[in-house]
Image (tube, rainbow, N blue to C red):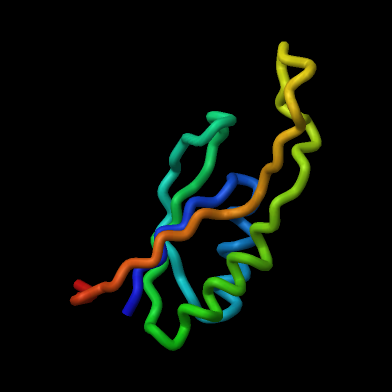
Amino acid sequence: MKLLITIVQDPDVQPLLEKLTENGLSATKLASTGGFLKAGNTTLLIGVTDDKVALTLDIIEDVCKSNPDKNNRRGLLSRSPATSVGSATVFKLDVERFERI
């Protein structure tokens, strides 16, 4: 069993949760903030059996594609480069023991 700690941009959270649910997967959702843009994001804790890891990563990759930031989030720094939003960061951890109480 694996625990996928997945950090996702807020606009991608709902579509990702829907796609995970469609495929019989579930996640625990935690609000978080961080990164260069200090933008809101969400951390999903996704527990999956070893045979579902590839499927889960494919879903995350499909839903959380990197896109140019339409608002450009440049603020006062008009010469700063455009940034990308979207994408996800995934940490894959081995789970030694799992109990549902």
Q: Specify whether 93 is left or right of 46.
A: left
Percent x, y of residue 78:
78, 16
Q: Residue furthest bottom?
A: 51
- Identify the residue at image location x=32%, y=67%: 93
Percent x, y of residue 48:
40, 77
- Identify the residue at image location x=41%, y=48%: 30
Say how many tags the image has: 0
Q: Residue furthest top?
A: 76
Q: Quadrant of the C terminus?
A: bottom left
Residue 28's place in the image compared with 101, above or below, is above
Residue 42's place in the image compared with 44, above or below, is above
Percent x, y of residue 72:
76, 30
In which quarter of the view is residue 59 placed? bottom right
Q: Specify whether 96 is left or right of 30.
A: left
Percent x, y of residue 43:
45, 51
Query: Which residue is nearer to you in this view: 16 or 7?
Result: 7
In which quarter of the view is residue 20 placed? bottom right
Residue 72's place in the image compared with 76, above or below, is below
- Identify the residue at image location x=65%, y=58%: 64
Q: Specify whether 12 is left or right of 47.
A: right
- Identify the residue at image location x=32%, y=80%: 1
Query: Which residue is nearer to you in this view: 78 or 1?
Result: 78
